[in-house]
Image: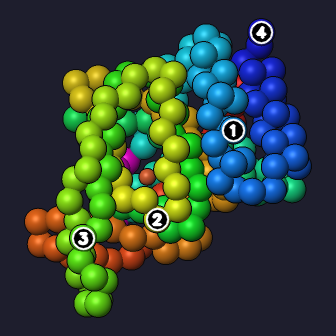
Amino acid sequence: MSNQSAVQKFIASTRRLHAEESDPRKRWEKMTPLLQELLADPSVKEQSMKWPDCSQGGERAENLLFYEDPDYRFVINGLIKAPHSRTQIHDHAHNWTLYGVLDGTETIMRYERVDDRSKPDYAEIRGVSKLRAGPGEVDLVRPWEIHAEASGDERTVAIIVRAEKAGGFLQGRYDPVNKKYWQGYGPKQLPYQLK
Ligand SMILES: [Fe+2]
C-alpha cells in the first residue's frame, strides 16, 4: 500500500465518521481505531524518518500541518520531539484531540485542577497519571484536559488529529511550581507535504 493511500484512507474514513456521528464525544471515541490503523501502516513510519523536529521551546511550540479538511475542519498534525524534550503543561481549550504515537516511546502526564478557579493567573494542579505510550498507542485528549508529553532517550514521532486547527485561539498553560495559570496561542502550524 502506498503511503498516500494509507493517509487518504484515513481521511476518507474520518470524513465518513464526521458525516455519520454528530455527537463529538462518540465521534472522537470511534476515531481511535481509525488512527491506530494509520499508525500501523509501515509506509507511514518509513516516511516519518525524514520529518523535521518540532521546537517545544519558547512561548509557542510547533506542529507539522499535514492536512486540514475543507468541510469538517479536522486537521492532521505531526509532532516530532528531539530526545529529552517535553511540552509545557497545557490544555487544548475546546478542541478534541487524538494523540497517536508513531515512533519512539513517550511519557504522557495527566493533571487535574484542584483550586476553585477564583483567582486569575493562579492554578493549582496535581498529577493524576503518568503513562508510557509506545508505537500504535492513542491518547484521547478531551476538551480542557490538562496534560504534557515528554520524549525520553530517543526521538519520538506523534500523529495528532484535532477537531480544528490549533494556533488561532487561546489555550491554558500551567506552572505547577509557581502555581501560575496563563493562556497562549497553540502550536504554530508548519505546512508539510506528505508524499
Ligand atoms: Fe497537548
Kindly report which numbered mark, 4 or 2, lies closer to the viewer in this rendering.
2
What amino acid is labelled 1 in the image? Lys
Tag 2 residue: 144
Q: Which residues are magenta?
A: 55-59
Local SS, label 4: loop
Image height of 177 relative to 87, above or below: below
Tag 1 residue: 30
Q: In whole angstroms, how far apart are the C-alphas of marks 4 and 3?
A: 48 Å
Tag 3 residue: 114
Farthest-out residue, left: 177
Local SS, label 2: loop
Q: In whole angstroms, how far apart are the C-alphas of marks 1 and 4?
A: 24 Å
Tag 4 residue: 1
Local SS, label 1: helix
Marks 4 and 2, the one that precedes in the sequence = 4
Figure quadrant of residue 108: top left
Magenta stretch containing residue 75, yes or no? Answer: no
- Asked if labels 2 and 4 touch by Cβ distance under 8 angstroms, the answer is no
What amino acid is labelled 4 in the image? Met
- Measuring from the top left, give residue 22's x and y in whole percent: 81, 56
Mark 1: few/some/many CA within 10 Å (<14, 14-19, 20+):
some
What amino acid is labelled 3 in the image? Val
